[in-house]
Image: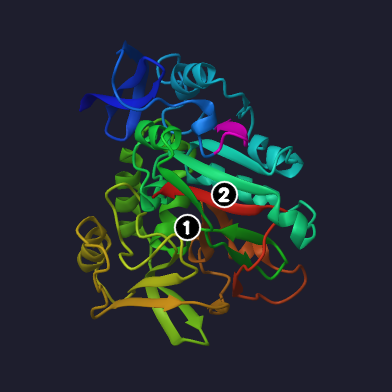
Amino acid sequence: MTQQSTIPLVKVGKQHFKVQAENEDDHYLSFKLEVETNENDGADTLRQDLLWSDAEVVVLDSVKSGLGRSPENDFYTNVIKPVFEELKVSARVIRTESSNSVTEFAKTLKASSPITIIIFISGDTTISEFINGLNSNHAIGKEDKKSSSLWFLPLPFGTANAWATSLGIKNPVAGFGDFLQNKLSPQPFPLYKAKFPNAHEVVFFIIFSIGFHANLLHLCKEKRFDNIGVEKFRIAAQEILQTYELDYPLQLPSKLPTQHFAYFTLINTPFLEKTYMPSPSSDPLKSELHLLGYIAAFDKTKLIEKIMRGYYNKPREDISVDGVVYEPFNDDFEVSFEELSETDPNTKTEICCDGHLLNMRDLQVKGKEFDGTVKIEFLKEYSAFDLKVLTPK
């Protein structure tokens, strides 16, 4: 169902900027900037009033996120650019041209001022690609590090937008308006690293999953699901429930005995979608991962019931019931797959890590026996920058 809304943005001089947005579900079809003139109405916003007036600003537009970009829904061209011009704010604009654009930009990023703000017009995966790209930057001394900060502003334009939603930024127009009105403050956020047997590493900040969630993301990447939209998740979920065994024996030696899971996730955010909150005790700004697992003994009806519970959970609600494993972790630990047989399907070893789709069979040391251990590290330091995210005050 298509909806229209008009959202106040900012006042500059006598001009009141508003945005008329048209959306269908969580996908934005168009943005139109409207300007009204009013002689005497409240405080004015000038560049020097902005919290970030001396910062370097970069707009990173992942042009294929969401519905992609059209002249009507181009948020940078239709909204950000004219407002920045009025405020006399200069910004560097990066529009993705290939699957490597974000990683290459992150690898070569050099700060030209003490604070650099990255405005992400994207979903979660783009932010993950950027953070993992920073990993190749050389670390610098502590004093230099303190003077080189990266502040992230995630404007939700993806399919799930788990991070922005969990941080309280549920609408790109309102989020950008809060940014202009100094209603956001920079906060440090936790990062984690998954290390695999062949030394491959992925830094993540939302979710690491094995089982149903990982299977779903892997299956939806098949070409037959192209151009279907969000309906692909329902179709793929039905196929998984009907044809996959959904029995994943995993061991967490320092915390829990080996258990058989149908659904296994390590989550840092309460939300995975705008209205889906499977982990109500999670806090995206707290260094803590919650293990959320549903046991393999559930029949398919019960498993669906548990998965769908995320649409009805309340903040901080205790969801630990029979068959649901819900445990917090605050320090490094390991997750281990049990030994595989040659007849086990590849779906048994599928992994999703913040949108990065992996398979444990592909992450082995050549010539050695299968090693099912994934090391999960809580990162204390990362990259040459002091990383923060802008969140509602």
Q: Is residue 209 above or below residue 25?
A: below
Q: Please give the count of numbered marks on the rendered protein.
A: 2
Which amino acid, mark 1?
A: Ile
The answer to which quarter of the image holds residue 12 is top left
Identity of the amino acid at label 2?
A: Ser
The residue under the point 26% across, 63% down is 315
Specify the label residue 128 is tagged with: 2
Magenta-colored stretch includes residue 66: no
Look at the numbered disc 2 and give the secondary structure of its residue: helix
Res 234 seen here:
yes
Residue range highlighted in magenta: 52-61
Q: Is residue 73 left or right of residue 323?
A: right
**Other-residue count near label 2 (Cα within 10 Å), few / some / many at <14 / 14–19 / ≥20:** many
Check if residue 59 falls in the magenta segment. Answer: yes
Quarter holding the N terminus is top left
Residue closest to the eye, 82 or 154: 82
Residue 13's spot in the image, x, y percent? Answer: 41, 17
User: Which element carries disc 1, helix, strand or loop?
Assistant: loop
Sequence order check: which comes first, mark 2 or mark 1?
2
Q: Nearer the viewer, residue 326 or 301?
A: 326
Q: Nearer the viewer, residue 246 or 108?
A: 108
Residue carrying label 1 = 206
Relative image position of residue 52 (x, y in whole percent): 55, 38
User: Would you say residue 219 is visible in this rendering?
Assistant: no
**Gap in Å between the C-alphas at discs 2 and 1?**
9 Å
Q: Position of residue 125 (x, y in %)?
A: 52, 45
Give the number of the disc on residue 77: none
- Look at the magenta stretch and give its main secondary structure: strand
> Residue drawn at (43%, 49%), measured in percent from left and top?
391
Which corner quadrant of the image does residue 279 belong to?
bottom left
**Residue 370, horizontal then vertical, whole percent:** 65, 75
**Residue furthest front as drawn:** 40
